[in-house]
Image: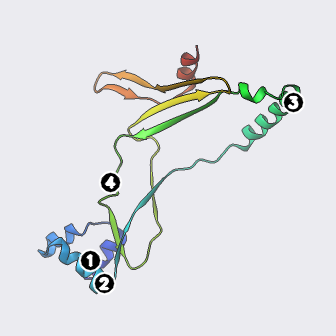
Amino acid sequence: METLASESAAGISSIREPGRHLSLPPFSIRNILHGVLNQYPYKLQSCHELYRLIPKRVKHLRGESSPKLKKDSFWFLNILRIDEAHFSLHDPHTTHNCRIWTTSNPRVYTEKPLHATKVTVWCGFTGSFSMGPLFFETQCLVNGWKTVSVNAERYLTYLR
């Protein structure tokens, strides 16, 4: 029982694994965890890793744009706003089947890497037009096409 409780609380095994070792069906293990050990299943939440903003860039942009806005009040409509999104093709784990059994909500988030296998989509827009969506890929000899991130060289090639 102690092993079952510690493994389930740590999230290192599924309820099927102890069931195989003890020759018990999964619903019996679930009943033991819930009824005897007073534990409940919690679904893991995932979030992206966050990087710190660079305050120097923000101050530089603020200092640059103020004089231009004083001269032309519609100057901000000429700013090209861009964004790229990464859509993961293969999540590291399926949260549908992943549960942690414990007596209280662990309020734990699992961080997933930003640079997993993904599709990168880029778009941009100003006050008068939009560009994209554009998929950034390069030809790969092994798998056909490989998704790549938007860097300065690829960005300039697209704008030209």
Which one is earlier in the sequence, the residue at label 3 or at label 4?
3
Is residue 132 shown left or right of residue 8? right
Q: Which residue is mark 3?
A: 67
**Residue positioned 29% across, 60% down in the render:** 97
* Image height of 118 relative to 12, above or below: above
Q: Are marks 1 and 2 in contact (CB under 8 Å)?
A: yes
C-alpha span from label 3 to label 1: 66 Å
| Amino acid type of the residue that numbered disc 1 sits on in the rendered structure | Leu
Q: Quadrant of the C terminus?
A: top right
What number is the disc on residue 73?
none
Residue tagged 1: 4
Task: Name the residue carrying label 4.
Answer: 94
Q: Amino acid at mark 4?
A: Thr
Kind of residue sitting beneath label 2:
Leu
Measure how far apart labels 1 and 2 are at the Cα level: 9 Å
Tell me the element at label 4.
loop
Badge 2 is on which residue?
A: 37
Within 10 Å of the Cα at label 4, are there few (<14), some (14-19), or many (20+) other Cα atoms? few
**Which label's residue is closer to the chain start, 3 or 2?**
2
Q: Secondary structure at mark 3?
A: helix
Image depth: mark 1 or mark 2 in front: 2
The span from disc 3 to disc 2 (Cα, nearest Å) is: 67 Å
Which residue is pictured at 62% across the width and 23% down the height? 129
- Give left or right: position of 67 versus 104: right
Depth-wise, is mark 4 or mark 1 nearer the camera?
A: 4
At which x and y percent is residue 77? 72, 27
Instruction: Mark 3: give few (<14), some (14-19) or many (20+) Cα within 10 Å.
Output: few
